[in-house]
Image (cartoon, rainbow, N blue to C red):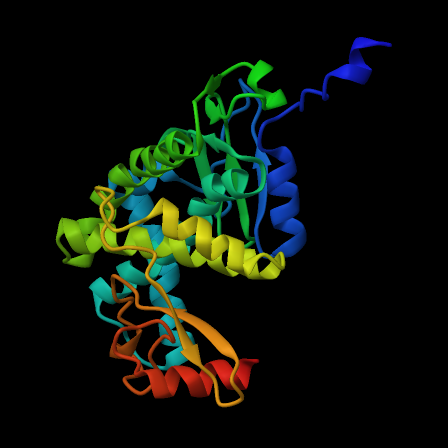
Amino acid sequence: MTVSAVLPAVPASPVAASYARLSEAFPGLRIRELGPTEPAPRGAGWVGADELAAGGPALDAFLAWDDAQVLRDYGRQARPDVVASFGLHRYAWPACLLVTMPWFLHRRVPRIPVGQVAFQRALGLMTVRITEFACLPGDPAAALPGARVVPDEEALRAELRDSLAEHFGPVLEGFGPRMRRGRRALWGMATDEIVEGLWYVGSLLGEEPRAMAELELLLPGTAKPYVGAAGFRELAGPDGAVLPTRDRASCCLFYTLRPEDTCVTCPRTCDAERLRRLTTAA
């Protein structure tokens, strides 16, 4: 018997299969890994996460897109802090998936420092360079360069929290002055993006219950710097169906544009209204 018949094949990349499955389920986001010496894209709508973290002209240009979009779609000017909140959401939601999807699908947690990520939101493209990742014992990817084996699932969850905190710490510093929010509110937004991104993609993959259960373990409400728990709860639909919901730890401020049209997970949205929307969607 050959060795290849005994041992599972070592993947060429620890995250490629996860990113491919993400794009299949959600074509609005495509992720490309960069080679060790390949430069990150710049210009033509690209922005580096490090540029957003710097809080300078690149962030100004990034938020100008949101400012123009709000005026075009809603016919009114948004406050600067509202524009910044929209911009952070539109970056953070896909950026979280760079880490949560490999963890959810293949139990691998890449490190993504801000210098290794770039975003082209008009085209739904991200690039990332992975040089380090964590995995569990027995994972074939443990033989790859940059692998770090951790003992169990809780240790891997800690790696995921650390990876996203390493990335979003600088990003929140860049956005913070524009948003006029304190540290707790900013990390509440990061918490919500982690939860709602994986929850949504998990539902596209037909694995919503598992995604919710995994997120409850990942964010129990005591893991700093994150604020709040995954916080899922259930509502009873009119036909006896169980409809999942949660209360966000933060507010996206969309109500400042349309007070009557809050997000379905906003604490401002009462359960009766949630049931109406969720039942209509179903």
The structure residue drawn at horizontal position 38% and vertical position 34%, both measured from the top left corner, is 154
Say whether residue 168 is visible. yes
Say whether residue 46 is visible. no
Q: Return the residue found at the far front.
A: 240
Q: Which x, y percent locates residue 270?
A: 30, 83
Left or right placement of residue 238 versus residue 50 in this view: right
The image quarter in which residue 115 lies: top left
Q: Relative to the observer, which residue lies in front, 68 or 260? A: 260
Q: Eyeballing the image, is 161 above or below 7?
A: below
Q: Looking at the figure, which quarter contains the N terminus?
A: top right
The structure residue drawn at horizontal position 57% and vertical position 80%, both measured from the top left corner, is 282
The structure residue drawn at horizontal position 49% and vertical position 31%, both measured from the top left corner, is 40
Q: Which x, y percent locates residue 105?
A: 58, 42
Number of disc labels: 0
Q: Relative to the observer, which residue lies in front, 33 or 209? A: 209
Left or right placement of residue 3 versus residue 103 in this view: right
Q: Relative to the observer, which residue lies in front, 63 or 179? A: 179
Q: Which x, y percent locates residue 206?
A: 62, 59
Left or right placement of residue 10 versus residue 170 in this view: right
Left or right placement of residue 171 versus residue 153 in this view: left
Q: Eyeballing the image, is 86 above or below 149?
A: below
Q: Eyeballing the image, is 32 above or below 3?
A: below
Q: Return the residue found at the far top.
A: 2
Q: Which x, y percent locates residue 174?
A: 23, 44
